[in-house]
Amino acid sequence: MITANNVADAIRKKAPEYLAESWDNVGLQIGSFDQPVKKVLLTLDVTNEVVDEAVAGGFDMIVSHHPFLFQGLKTINTDDYKGKLVEKLVKNGICVYSAHTNLDKANLGLNDYIAGKFDLDERAPLKPDKDEQLYKIVVYVPTDYTEKILKVLGDGGAGFTGDRYSHCSFRVTGEGRFKPLDGSNPFIGTPGEVVKVNEDRIETIVDGRILKDLFPALKEAHPYEDMAYDLYPVEQADIMKKSGLGKIGTLEKEMEPEEFIEFTKKALNIKHLRTAGEPPESVKKVALCTGSGAEFIGLSKVKGADVYVTGDLKYHDAQRARENGMWVIDAGHFGTEKQVVNLLEEMIRGRFGDGEIETRVSDKNEDFFKNY
Ligand SMILES: [Zn+2]
């Protein structure tokens, strides 16, 4: 039986919730993590139309990019839009899970997915996450316990490099020595005598943000009264950081601005876009940020991008683009994010075997803007 938590896990593996911005509200929005799930509906926004689609199609779960509950709910008044939706979801046993800025910022998250549509090479976060701090963790353990400790480390998210490999580690076997003192209750040896133990030195890498969960589990699994370990911060230049907002990378071949406009429409599968600022002679380096990215116009310029593709620009953002000499393409909030449903579907399908779970992209989710 697959639960809502299993589905959430498929997404968390690639886009851990700790990546979310502090103002965000990601995770379970409605329902229970223990709820059995057979059918998942994927959407950018949870609207009345999407909820009706879920009810009609017998879905147990909706996974959205934009959090269903965002600004905080003071009352659940079933006379208003949101209250009615809450009631409808609960009555029909549909749970809602949202992956928002954690999905935007993950190395292989939404910005990377869209960068892939542009075939960008040498991708890096446009604004690397300031909270990303890696540690080298070294654990010394009697060799009989090595596999147990490796499992706790790996399952707990350590040794997760570049998002394409998990459970990475290195170990060497050697001799550990210690002398238990009076008052100790040693796992091996007797107080007052030096003990030699065959130990493995296990080392791996861990994101500092998971230490608070990993550490207690590790201590629990380690046989010694005082776990023997070292923890070293790893020096990381911004260029080595993998998570962050937006992406920057280079096109396979240089393009004329007009050609790039058509290329963008194809990459994003949209019919309309607008531009601001003077186009460059040619486009090679592309910065992008899905959703609302007006704040990174200056950063794109500083990082040497020839164009910045984002959504939700206001009139004075366009003015700023022109004043900064940055060519900006506003492809719309929906335009830059609508393919999130395909990414979410890939993440879920990649986790479960055929026939284990049914997923569908909502066909009721649409742009709140209409272009004519
Ligand atoms: Zn958005």
Image: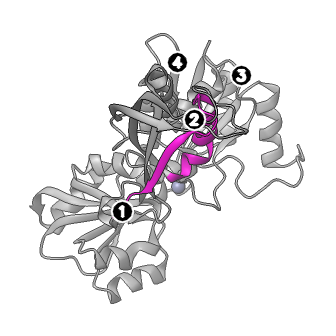
Question: Closer to the N terminus: mark 2 or mark 1?
Answer: 2
Amino acid identity at mark 1: Glu
Local secondary structure at mark 2: helix
State the residue lying farthest toward the bottom.
323
- Give the percent coordinates (x, y) of residue 43: 55, 39
The residue pinned by badge 3 equals 35
* Labels 4 & 3 near each other (Cβ < 8 A): no
Q: Are marks 1 and 3 in contact (CB under 8 Å)?
A: no
Check residue 113 for magenta coloring.
no
Q: Earlier in the sequence, mark 3 or mark 2?
A: 3
Secondary element under disc 1, as helix, strand or loop, is loop
- Distance from disc 4 to disc 3, alpha carbons, whole Å, reads 15 Å
Vertical comparison of 286 with 367: above or below: below
Q: Residues within 10 Å of mark 3 (few under 14, many from 20)?
A: some
Residue sitting at x 59%, y 28%: 223
> Which residue is identified by label 2?
218
Q: Quadrant of residue 138?
A: top left
Instruction: Name the residue beneath numbered marker 1.
Output: 235
Which sits earlier in the primary sequence, circle 1 or circle 3?
Answer: 3
Q: Which residues are magenta?
A: 208-236
* Of pointers 4 and 3, the one earlier in the residue sequence: 3
Position in image of residue 68 (x %, y %)? 68, 46
Q: Residues within 10 Å of mark 4 (few under 14, many from 20)?
A: some
Location of the C terminus by quadrant is: bottom left
> Most extreme residue toward the front, as rendered?
192
Q: What's the CA distance linking mark 3 and mark 2?
A: 29 Å
Dot in front, 4 or 3 = 3
Q: Label 2, label 4: how many angstroms apart (C-alpha)?
A: 36 Å
Which amino acid type is marked by label 3? Gln
Amino acid identity at mark 2: Leu
